[in-house]
Image: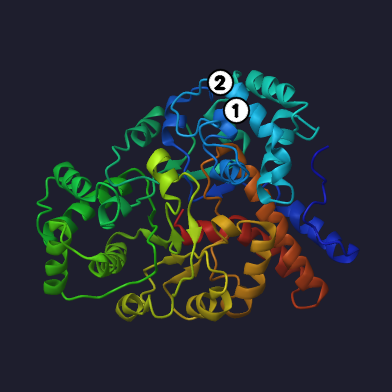
């Protein structure tokens, strides 16, 4: 077999024994996936996935980012193509370079899918690339591998997508009308209409006005349009918003100041400082709206997006060239927290790509303010090491109950059960260590294992 049954468990036998027992108690619990980038259209149409390369290589920036770093071109991988001309050639190229993923979480996710879903128990290589391709392609053509069947096979209880305010949400509506029992909900991601640096920002704001019938030429109409858009999402099951700003900066301007700033933004005359101030104000405005409508707010700051200008210009956003940066939370969040930090009816989930902030900023903030919770290790840190560092650095100040369990944040649908399995194994290993060190009673560890698996996430995301 490719995967060892004791993977990620502690080497010390007494701790490993407890970790095994804890894991056995949560291994088969339903998966709650409250934040990700799968597509509602997959489940509404329920059509077979086209081929192995389009399923495993093309949508997964973890995969093609690594290949690109070793000289494999995006053109060779056919990234960004609606239809692949030669998917088998792409797959062979992927298999030839599979060794590059040694020791990475991506390797574990892929091996899990290959073994658990397709029964492939020999390590992928250039030699067996076609065997892999043919087996996967054959199984993808069966009804058991259509999106809805896989949703049920994975034990998914709920799956959230991430959607622009301008999205019609027609596929979400179709799913609700279909009678299928799966629960796919949208997440409100307003970046295209609140970030002045977003390509096509002015056109997108005008489209928001047309869609809602509000006059977005003025500040009041713009806010009214956003409220309408949020209400439309809520009617289709949305429980959360998501904000991918460059920083965590917030602001609390007066109505007059905000109106003047908005006028400068929509005129296209705002400078970089004004654009950042506008994003900061919009985080506070979104928090106000969350107090009104109950949507949970997620803030995902700290990524320098589209760092590779050539890749961005040729292949667009989200093409794997985003880089973490240092992020300030204590000062940046203070304007918002001064205004609403003590509101128990508001939930703001904070994520970071800057691990140095765990014990210094994030855990103390979440360990005090009623509205704050800590999101799990994200993106570059959703690895066994990253998850363990998070627990070690955040638990001492924030505890477990100011965190929100795990979310997979993936575009690669077949990696979802693998990612959740890794998180469950790591959390059980951490809890087992606390039991052996007599810092936690065993009955408490079993209760916490269930909470970390799906109890906390359901509560935090109001699912």
Label of residue 90 in the image? 1
In which image quadrant can residue 95 be found? top right
Q: Is residue 19 left or right of residue 398?
A: right
- Residue at the (71%, 69%) spot, across then down: 444
Q: What x and y, as percent, mark residue 119?
A: 75, 29
Q: Is residue 190 left or right of residue 101?
A: left
Quarter the N terminus occupies: top right
Q: Is residue 28 above or below residue 355?
A: above
Label 1 residue SS? helix
- Pointer 1 with pointer 2, Cβ within 8 A: yes
Q: What x and y, as percent, mark residue 319?
A: 47, 44
Q: What x and y, as percent, mark residue 99?
A: 74, 41
Q: Give the CA distance from mark 1 to mark 2.
A: 7 Å
- Residue at the (44%, 44%) spot, across then down: 311
Q: Is residue 70 above or below residue 335?
A: above
Q: What x and y, as percent, mark residue 23?
A: 75, 55
Front-lying residue, 364 or 185: 364
Looking at this view, name the residue that lies furthest to the right. Answer: 13
| Label 2 crowd (10 A; few <14 / some 14-19 / many >=20) | few
Label of residue 436 in the image? none
**Residue occupied by mark 2:** 86
Q: How many marks?
A: 2
Label 2 residue SS? loop
Front-lying residue, 75 or 249: 75
């Amino acid at each position: 077999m490719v995967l060892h049954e004791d993977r990620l468990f502690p080497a010390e036998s007494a701790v490993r024994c407890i970790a095994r027992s804890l894991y056995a108690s949560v291994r088969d619990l339903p998966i709650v996936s409250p934040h990700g980038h799968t597509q509602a259209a997959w489940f509404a149409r329920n059509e077979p996935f086209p081929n192995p390369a389009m399923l495993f290589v093309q949508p997964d920036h973890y995969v093609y980012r690594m290949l690109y770093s070793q000289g494999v071109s995006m053109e060779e991988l056919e990234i960004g193509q609606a239809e692949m001309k030669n998917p088998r050639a792409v797959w062979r190229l992927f298999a030839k370079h599979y060794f590059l993923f040694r020791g990475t979480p991506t390797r574990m996710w892929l091996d899990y899918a290959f073994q658990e879903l397709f029964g492939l128990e020999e390590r992928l290589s250039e030699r067996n690339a076609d065997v892999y391709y043919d087996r996967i392609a054959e199984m993808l053509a069966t009804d058991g591998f259509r999106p809805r069947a896989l949703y049920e096979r994975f034990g998914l209880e709920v799956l959230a997508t991430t959607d622009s305010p301008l999205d019609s949400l027609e596929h979400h509506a179709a799913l609700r009308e279909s009678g299928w029992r799966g629960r796919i909900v949208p997440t409100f991601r307003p970046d295209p209409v609140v970030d002045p640096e977003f390509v096509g920002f002015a056109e997108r704001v005008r489209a928001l006005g047309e869609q809602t019938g509000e006059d977005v030429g003025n500040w009041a109409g713009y806010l009214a349009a956003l409220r309408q858009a949020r209400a439309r999402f809520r009617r289709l099951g949305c429980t959360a918003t998501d904000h991918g700003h460059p920083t965590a900066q917030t602001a609390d301007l007066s109505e007059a100041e905000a109106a003047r700033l908005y006028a400068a933004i929509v005129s296209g005359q705002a400078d970089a400082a004004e654009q950042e101030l506008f994003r900061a104000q919009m985080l506070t405005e979104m928090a106000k709206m969350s107090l009104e409508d109950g949507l949970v707010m997620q803030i995902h700051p700290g990524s320098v997006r589209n760092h590779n200008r050539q890749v961005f210009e040729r292949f667009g956003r989200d093409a794997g060239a985003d880089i973490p940066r240092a992020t300030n939370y204590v000062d940046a969040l203070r304007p918002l927290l001064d205004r609403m930090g003590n509101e128990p009816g508001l939930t703001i989930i904070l994520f970071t790509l800057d691990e140095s902030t765990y014990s210094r900023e994030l855990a103390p903030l979440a360990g005090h303010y009623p509205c704050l919770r800590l999101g799990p290790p994200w993106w570059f840190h959703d690895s066994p090491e990253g998850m363990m560092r998070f627990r070690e650095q955040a638990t001492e100040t924030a505890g477990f109950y100011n965190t929100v369990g795990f979310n997979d944040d993936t575009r690669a649908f077949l990696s979802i059960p693998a990612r959740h399995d890794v998180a469950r194994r790591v959390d059980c290993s951490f809890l087992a260590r606390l039991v052996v060190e007599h810092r936690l009673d065993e009955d408490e560890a079993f209760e916490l294992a269930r909470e970390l698996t799906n109890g906390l996430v359901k509560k935090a995301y109001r699912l």
